[in-house]
Image (cartoon, rainbow, N blue to C red):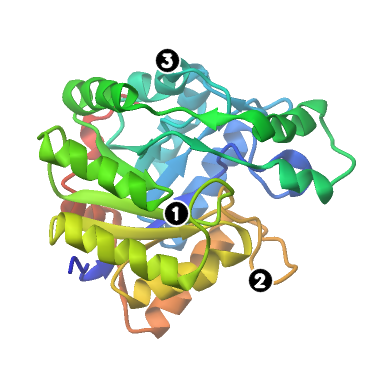
Amino acid sequence: MAKSQKVIISCAITGSVHTPTMSEHLPLTPDQIAADAVAAAEAGAAILHLHARNGEDGKPTADPDVYMEFLPRIKQQCDAVCNITTGGGLGMTLDQRLAGPMRASPEMCSLNMGSMNFGLFPILDKIKDFKHEWERKHLEMTRDFIFKNTFKDIEGIFKKMGEDHGTRFEFECYDVGHLYNLAHFVDRGLVKPPFFVQTIFGILGGIGADPKNLMHMREIADKLFGGDYKWSILAAGRHQLPFVTMGAIMGGNVRVGLEDSLYAGKGKLAKSNAEQVTIIRSILENLSLEVASPNDAREMLALKGGDLVKF
């Protein structure tokens, strides 16, 4: 069983799922993203998972120039690992999704390990009035949307980001089949250990947020990867804290952040990413678990180092 001596806290700062109407605390502009990310790092996050947004209306963007408005500032102000999305935003092409990472050459990127339905449309039943018209369209389009990452797409990302940039990956596994997809690439020698396997629960289209599923995903990952991987857990919405706590008790690393949940307790919107990091850090320390520093994370995941990025 692949247990970590220290627990890596990842924090997903803004994502592309939530929209401005859902929370006034969601960071949208480059200034907000940079400030929120640095505060999350100061609170204990070793890894910052980053998306870009249009500062005018908060819509997800793939523009590498926007990434470069906040990435250098984050690096100047903290030592956290910057982990840039290759998932981008819903409906972006693969080339668009890779534009930011290709420019930045980060230590780490996220990588969805398969194509999947990605349903956000049930949120429309809860919100009637939106600040921006794009938000309603963004949610509605997911009724008839497949997030595409074929085997060919994933091979290309390994080549462009892994081989060409020395970037390593947060392998996002939304279902059991995604673990087997990763094992396929491991068997072919296209990816080398240690693997950072992020198991994701509670997205409509992926595996549900059931504690038995958490245990099953861990069991299958152990079977496929043995001691060659570092396990991490994230869960959507209200499932976030219970699931990551359960995963930490089982020897896993954890991910929080406003990309995954907007809340810091029942009915209480989180005022920042740092608030969520502070909560999970307190839980971990009360469980007598030691929180990993950014350099601990770099060593555990065999990252290339912050001096070799292009921002």
* Relative height, residue 86 to residue 257 (above, below): above
Q: Position of residue 79 (x, y in %)?
A: 33, 47
Q: Going from the N terminus, do you reach mark 1 or mark 2 first?
A: 1
Front disc: 2 or 3: 3
Task: Tell me the SS state at disc 2.
Answer: loop
Front disc: 3 or 1: 1
Q: Where is residue 232 in the image (x, y as percent from the top left)?
A: 34, 59
Provide the residue designation for mark 2: 265
Q: In which quarter of the image is the N terminus?
A: bottom left
Pick the residue in front: 4 or 147: 147
* Residue 95: image tag: 3
In this image, 24 relative to 164: left or right?
A: right
Amino acid of disc 1: Ile
Amino acid of disc 2: Gly
Q: Are marks 2 and 3 in contact (CB under 8 Å)?
A: no
Task: Tell me the SS state at disc 1.
Answer: strand
The residue located at (21%, 69%) in the rendering is 3
Pick the residue in front: 188 or 239: 188
Provide the residue designation for mark 1: 200
